[in-house]
Amino acid sequence: MLAYETYQPSFDPSMSYGYKNHSYGHFSHSRKSSLSLPTYTQPNNILILGATGTIGMHITRAIVDAHSQGHFGRISIYTSLKTMVEKVQDICALEVWGVEIFWGSLDDETMFKDACKGVDTIVSCLGRNAIEKQIPIMSWAEEMGVGRFFASEYGTDIEYFPDSVHEPPHQMKLKVRAHMATLRRMEHTFMVTGPYSDLYFGAMKEHPSAGGFDVEAGSAHLLGDGNMPVSFTAMNDVGKFVVAALINYMVSRNTTLIVHSFTATPNEILAEHERQTGRSWEKNYTCVKTLRAMEKQAYQIYSPLATVLTLRRIWTEGGTLHKFYDDSLLGFVETETLEDQVRLNIAKQTGRVPGGMSLLRTLSAV
């Protein structure tokens, strides 16, 4: 069980918390601030979108866990008919844990608004292919009186470098932020986590040059020269940070939270794999120039790998590092370490734990 703390500010909580600029290199983040008194109160009735997805299952698990400790009131999800059929075990697990299930299309205004009745907070965990669908959804949510919207922003900082606005994977999230800025009655929270260590540490067997750690083969493909630090967040920790942001709702009001579990270089990740497996690994390097060439070619042939290569190139160029993080503003959140994540990666790749998680398994562990 996880225990969550409430951050106690020593200043007037009615003021904006956009007091701090996050900067690295030549670019600084501007936080949307508001001097008006907040109308949103502590979250009670939460609707989750994308609850059974890659990051959604971890966020949902954390919210259900917090609910079992007495936080929040009603928890519900809005999902597709396809998910109801293909992930029936996950849906059953959620129902056992008292979660209400609404299903329908993200394009269906009537069905979505029906799911929003009585909801004060929406936590979106929609995948990359559905990011843009948040734009009409946010408007419908505001019309239904929803007070806070957690956008599906988890991952790479889309405003890190001055030219970040031109990166192809960022375009949909930038549109979502622009639309959010037009809304006047609904507050928001964006959360930047950097790459998920769970995925970065995996083996890219079909595209090894894109970087990865193959436990069975005892080989690693490292990006850059292996010495650029990368700020990671474990997927379980993303869920913990979202819950902490919900509980510390004043701190997370109308802002972009930047969080992380740990920072490590590719060489350090390899060294920890070697330490835990007790053997030396073969290692290869993919320089940034080669990574850019692979990226360009992937876009030319419309390969789904293109987005992965862009993000990995951004991370390798230092686009995850910040002088300041917001972890401490959210109270104490116990995060995973490099050692924890390497141990988990080895266990997954050697079959000691299932490689593909499900809500049925994660909720059974609550």
Image (cartoon, rainbow, N blue to C red):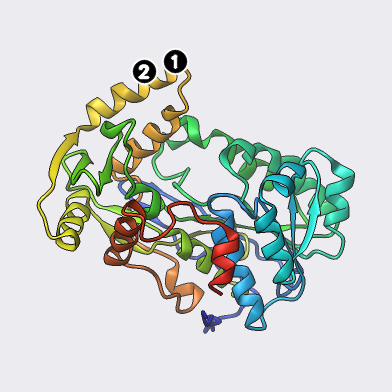
**Residue 214 appears in view:** yes
Query: Residue at (29%, 45%) from the top-left corner?
Result: 318
Mark 1, residues whose alpha carbon is within 10 Å: few (<14), some, or many (≥20)?
A: few
Mark 2, residues whose alpha carbon is within 10 Å: few (<14), some, or many (≥20)?
A: few
Q: Position of residue 346 (x, y in %)?
A: 29, 57
Tell how many labels.
2
**Going by the image, does 253 lie left or right of 299?**
right
Check if mark 2's residue and mark 1's residue have beta carbons within 8 Å: yes
SS for callout 1: loop
Name of the residue lying farthest toward the left: 280
Q: Quadrant of residue 162?
A: top left
Q: Pick the residue in front: 130 or 82.
A: 82
Query: Residue at (77%, 71%) from the top-left corner?
Result: 74
Query: In the rendered structure, which amino acid carries the disc numbered 1?
Result: Ile
Name of the residue lying farthest toward the front: 351
- Residue at which label 2 appears: 297
Q: Pick the residue in front: 264 or 87.
A: 87
Q: Which mark is residue 301?
A: 1
The vertical placement of 312 against 56, above or below, is above
Name of the residue lying farthest toward the top: 300
SS for callout 2: helix
Query: In the rendered structure, which amino acid carries the disc numbered 2?
Result: Gln
Q: Position of residue 309 (x, y in %)?
A: 37, 32
Query: Residue at (76%, 45%) from the top-left corner?
Result: 137
